[in-house]
Amino acid sequence: MTYFRRGRWAAAGLGFLAVVGGVALGCGSEDSPAPTQDQHAEDTVGAEDRERIEKGLELSPVPVNLEGLDRDLVGLGSYIVNAQGACNDCHTNPPFAPGGNPFLGEPERINTEHFLAGGMVFGTVVSPNITPDEEGLPGGYTLEEFLELMRTGREADEEDEILQVMPWPIYAKMTDRDLRAIYEYLRSIPPAQPGTAPAPAP
């Protein structure tokens, strides 16, 4: 069986998104540190960003822990993950709670117990758990490792392996700030375990 990620992600493999050092750059919330010299003008929060940030905080199907995190980045990341990136479709098994599948005409209810914990099977590929590990790193990735993975589809120590199924060539086109926001949101959600996946086809 092939996993989206090999090595540390041997438990799964698909959709989204690990950066610890650059997270402090943030979007510019009141609790954020003053901008640094290398902070780009695009990191400031405009009216459109503010709307997406607040909407993202409302959209998160699980509680977020903002302690030590940038609220604006978390909100923007939630908006991208939950309203644009479709991460739940591949990284939550099953994506919807019983009776909450909108594709069956039911009122949407996300499977919060296993939210983004991986375990979805796509042929011989299994989506990884991208919730925080015991050190608080989404999927065990630092921010730098996460950015490398999202930009190249490769892990630094697995250069001959390229992520399959996951649409990283699309995500690679995102701005650094948006990818940092996704990472910050993934840091803020509760750790979870994968749901039960059917046995993959041989």
Image: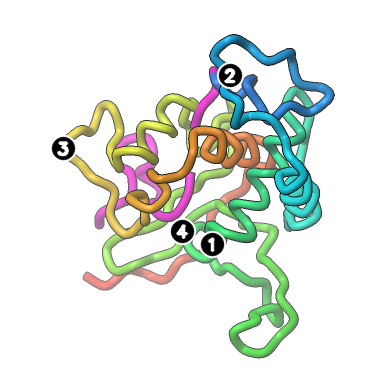
Q: Give the spatial CA distance, label 4 vs label 2.
A: 37 Å
Image quadrant occupied by the C terminus: bottom left
Q: Which residues are magenta?
A: 1-21
Residue type at numbered disc 4: Gly
For residue 188, which quarter of the picture?
top right
Chain-order first, disc 2 or disc 3: 2
| In-image side of 139 versus 33 (left or right) | left
- Are the residues at dot 2 and dot 1 in contact (C-beta closer than 8 Å)? no
What secondary structure is found at the residue carrying circle 1? loop
Q: Position of residue 141 (x, y in %)?
A: 46, 31
Q: Nearer the viewer, mark 4 or mark 1?
A: 1
Q: Give the spatial CA distance, label 1 vs label 3.
A: 27 Å
**Residue underneath mark 2:** 39
Q: Nearer the viewer, mark 4 or mark 2?
A: 2
Q: Give the spatial CA distance, label 4 vs label 1.
A: 16 Å
Q: Residue sitting at 42 percent across and 32 percent down? A: 147
Residues 138 and 174: in front is 174
Q: Residue sitting at 55 percent across and 69 percent down? A: 94
**Residue underneath mark 1:** 86
Residue type at numbered disc 3: Asp
**Residue underneath mark 4:** 119
Q: Nearer the viewer, mark 2 or mark 3?
A: 2
**Residue underneath mark 3:** 160
